[in-house]
Every structure is written in C-alpha cells, then in structure tokens.
Amino acid sequence: MKNSRIPSIDVFRGLTMLLMIFVNDLWTLRAIPSWLEHAEANVDFLGLADTVFPCFLFILGMSIPLGVDARLTKRESPVRISGHIVVRTLALLVMGVFTVNAPDINSELTGLSSAWFQILMVTAFFLIWNVYPKTFAPVLVRLLQGMGVLILLVLAVRFRGGTPENPQIFRPQWWGILGLIGWGYGVSALLYVWMKGTTGALVGAFFFFTLATIAAHADWQVAGFPLQDLILGNGAFHAFTMAGLLTTLLLRKQDSVRGVSFLVGGGCLMLGAGFIAHAYFITSKIQLRLPGCFCVPALHYWYMR
C-alpha cells in the first residue's frame, strides 16, 4: 500500500509538539532565560514559547487541503464535508471551554475535587471522540458516546467556581487554546471547501484576516461595533491557519524552485510589513499582535529540505 503521508509536514508537526511540551513546563523552573518564556501581554517582546501556537495554527492550515481533498476524492459532497468540519470544530470548542473552567473549580461548592473533575472530563472526551474499532457494534459506540455526553452535562451543571459569596457557574470565560484552534480550523476549512480551493479567493481571505487584525487593534469599528467583537480573535487565528493552507496549495501547484521562491519572497515581504507595522503596534502574542510572524511560510522551507 502506498504511503500517503508527507514527511515534511509530519516532521514540522512533531517538532511543534516537542516544543509545546518543552515550553509547557518552563513555569516549574527557576532562573531561566526570559527569551524562553511567554512575554507579558503589554511587553513588546516575543519569547520562544510565544512561537508555538502560531506554528501549530500554521501546520493545522497545511493539513486542511490534504484532508479535504482526500474526502473529495472519495466523492463526498461539499455539504457532507462541511458537516464533518462543523462537528470537529464543535468538539474543539467544547473541549476548550471545559479545560478553561477546570482550573477555577471550587471543590467545596461543586462537591467534586479538581482532580476528579479533570479525570471525568478527559474520560468523557475519550468516550465521545475516540475512534472506535470497526468491529464495535454501532449500538455500543452510540452508548459509549452517550455516556460521555452525559458526563459532560453533569459536570457542567454541577460546576461552581469563585467563592461562596460570589459563586460562578460553568461558562465560556474564553475559548481556550483548543477552542481557538477550533475557530481557526473551522473557518479556514469551510472557506477552502466552498471556495473550491481557488487560490486567488483564498489569498484574498488571508489578507482580509490579516488586515482585520490590524484594524481591530487600531480600534476601528463597523456600524458602531468593535471589529474585534465581529471577528473572533480579530482575525489572527484565521490568518495563521490560512497561511499554512496557502503554503500547501503553493507547494502542490508549483515546481520546487518556483514554490520556494514564492515562499521566501512572500516571507520577506511579510517580514518587511511587520517592521512597518511595528512602528504602530507592539509585538505581543497574548494580544495577538504578531506583525513580524507572517514570515512563517518562508521559514517552513527549512523543514521542507
């Protein structure tokens, strides 16, 4: 059987996951260099840890055309593929909201310790979204998934945070990293499906999200509403994901020399645009102000070689 995996994407994904695990435990150490850590929200700085999430979104975008095209090859309709994308997006949003609330649990008010809450939460995740063997009867799979949904519902209803004087119910304080990945994936994948992989239209979407990021932090408004409230994450999540998506399209449609030339040239242009934008905005991952980081497509060439 022919191996359909693309080694460069797997290597990039593996390196990103390795770096994610590495920076995730930096907070347990003392006297580590500041350039390894996350920068504070209002500090004009980008640490190594701040590069992980953008890289994750980028590699997510690179995988979208491959996954969608594989389904199209199997003659799945755009509507069915869109349904698959929506389900996966909802899964990431749900997991994101639960993981955001878990650290704020008040064990006395909830009647459940934080450890048990997280154990039951992760168990439910596996029950619902596990890829079950084909030998499992459909009825058994539905039963296990139903148990997972019931566990999450009970946890959400019983959850209480805050203090006895000011208790907080289960709520999307923010979407969490998984939820933000879900929004970036869902929007970008649906655009790819319904724009039918048209490169020009997708490039337009990339620049729209990039400009939306700038406009949001410039406090522009549309019909009296802040742009940041109209586009989740002011477009930054989607822009990074679209950058990866476009990189895959470019490398598939061009020969190696032209493809690399486009990536390096585009990366240099984006880096230059980042220096220009830096005169007006700080570089902050927490605030999603990353003007200099859209050179990722050019940096990806290092992995491709």
Image (spheres, helix red, strand yellow):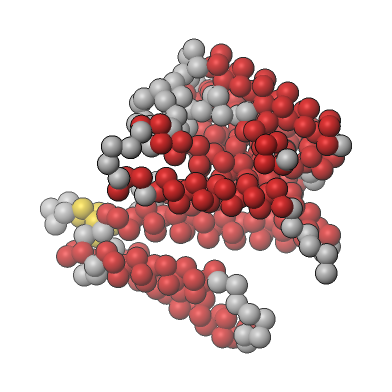
In this orientation, does residue 158 appear?
no
Q: Position of residue 277 (x, y in %)?
A: 54, 17
Q: Position of residue 43 (x, y in %)?
A: 36, 25
| Residue at 30 percent of width and 70 percent of height | 116
Q: Position of residue 285 (x, y in %)?
A: 45, 33
Look at the picture and state if 48 lies above or below 117: above
| Residue at 70 percent of width and 48 percent of height | 8
Which of 14 and 50 lies nearest the eye of the viewer? 14
Left of 240 or right of it: where is 150?
A: left
Look at the picture and state if 121 lies above or below 234: below
Which quadrant is the C terminus positioned in?
Answer: top right
Left of 19 or right of it: where is 257?
A: right
| Residue at 13 percent of width and 53 percent of height | 165
Which quadrant is the N terminus positioned in?
Answer: bottom right
Q: Quadrant of residue 203?
A: top right
Q: Position of residue 284 (x, y in %)?
A: 44, 28
